[in-house]
Amino acid sequence: MLGNITYESLSKRLAELEKLPAKKADKSIPELLEKKGVSRRDFMKWAGTVAAMLALPGSMTPLVAKAAELSDRLPVIWLHMAECTGCSEALLRSDSPTIDSLIFDHISLEYHETLMTAAGWQAEENLEHAIEDFKGRYILMVEGGIPSGDSSHFLTIGGHGTTGEESAKKASDHAAAIFAIGSCSSYGGIQAANPNPTNSVSLDKVTDKDVINVPGCPPSEKNIVGTLIYYILYGNLPALDAYNRPKWAYGIRVHDLCERRGRFDAGEFVEEFGDEGAKKGYCLYKVGCKGPYTFNNCSKNKFNNGASWPVQAGHGCIGCSEPDFWDTMGPYEEPKGNRLYDTPFGLGADATADKIGLGVLAATGVGIAVHAAISNVKKPKEGEEA
Ligand code: FSX
Ligand code: SF4
Ligand code: F3S
């Protein structure tokens, strides 16, 4: 039991959902998986990972699998504003679809400009019909920043010259749940970067309704699908942080679970790209990694079915899930120094990097290994005694 949420209460919600008409009756999840060569076992493994990600006990795994199977019961409208379509691309991965992308394929996508065949007047009509037919029942996902106010005409869509602002507002008015997919929709993104020539804003600036932000440029497919599965399971909003991001996904810093964290703590840093430290997988802080200031689960869940993530690929995190990261996290290949990241002793990350170990050891009262910590910082040169 989780608070007043029980296996039974979630099963009951799913049983209600199951009674709704299946939009993809011809193509159930088991069939879809089989066609793509994904075994039931792999699917259940995926469901177990999503359950863990949502902080559900392992016993809830069958419910997560069921929620995925029922993802065609809730209509979804996906709107594009000003962006690069990277968020959709994160899910589509048509070259090597992941289970997350198969779920995306399975949802009842009533409107998505990149995927639908309709264009022009017909596309506009499709959107109107989708909003009308599923009023109060659809999930709205919006990708992209929204040119607003006097500058809203920078984004007009279709023959009627509807602005993105009008269209996002109207679709929000009638949605059951609203997800801002990506940092553009969550905070304005690159369009809103200084000097913000199109007066682009985040989705929550054009609607009074609650918006769940799923930032990242792009966000991981796991965070998008996990947010959807959460909503299918619970029918309400997850616990959110100060920036309206689901805590289950954005509750930890990239730095906290980074595979190079041991290097940071040991004072082993890449000084410049391509050096010996880079080859040995040292910490990327001094070449600009913003993992210490960034809340996201990339270091835990990685991307592309757990294949890799920015730091593993050899570049620091650029803080892409933080508000206004285009303006606040640069320069991307230089450390931020003491501007934001602070230690309990007020040393700042750079100071920590140089005096590594001392503060931590003093704080915990551990009297050993001070010498080791210092000599770790002052690495002996080749052929020199430590
Ligand atoms: Fe692009 Fe999405 Fe970045 Fe923005 O992702 S990956 S510019 S968050 O809206 O398409
Ligand atoms: Fe990892 Fe970056 Fe933190 Fe280094 S600074 S441990 S590379 S997140
Ligand atoms: Fe973005 Fe940093 Fe993750 S750049 S993808 S938040 S590692």
Image (tube, rainbow, N blue to C red):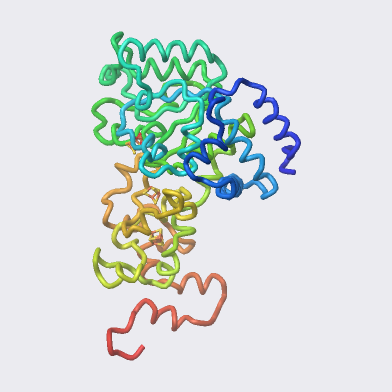
Quarter of the rendering occupied by the N terminus? top right
- In the visual, does 108 lie left or right of 315? right
Residue 2 in view in this figure: yes
Residue 355 or residue 380, whichever sits in front: 380
User: As rendered, which of 299 and 320 lies closer to the eye?
Assistant: 299
- The quarter holding residue 383 reads bottom left
Could you say where residue 48 lies in the image, as x and y percent from the top left?
60, 48
Picture coordinates of residue 183 (x, y %)? Answer: 38, 37
Q: How many marks?
A: 0
Q: Is residue 17 above or below residue 327?
A: above
* Figure quarter occupied by ligand 1: top left
Q: Which percent across, then down, holds residue 233?
A: 63, 34
- Quadrant of residue 190 within the rendered picture: top left
Q: Residue at x 30, y 8 (%)?
A: 160
Front position in the image: 177 or 122: 122
One can see residue 242 in this view:
no
| Residue 110 coordinates in the image, percent (x, y) | 46, 21
The answer to whether residue 125 is above or below residue 110 is above
Identify the residue shown where x is 59% and y is 38%: 239
Q: Look at 43% across and 33% down and name the residue there.
A: 181
Which quadrant is the C terminus positioned in?
A: bottom left
* Front residue (pair 195, 15): 15
Q: Residue at x 43, y 78 (%)?
A: 373
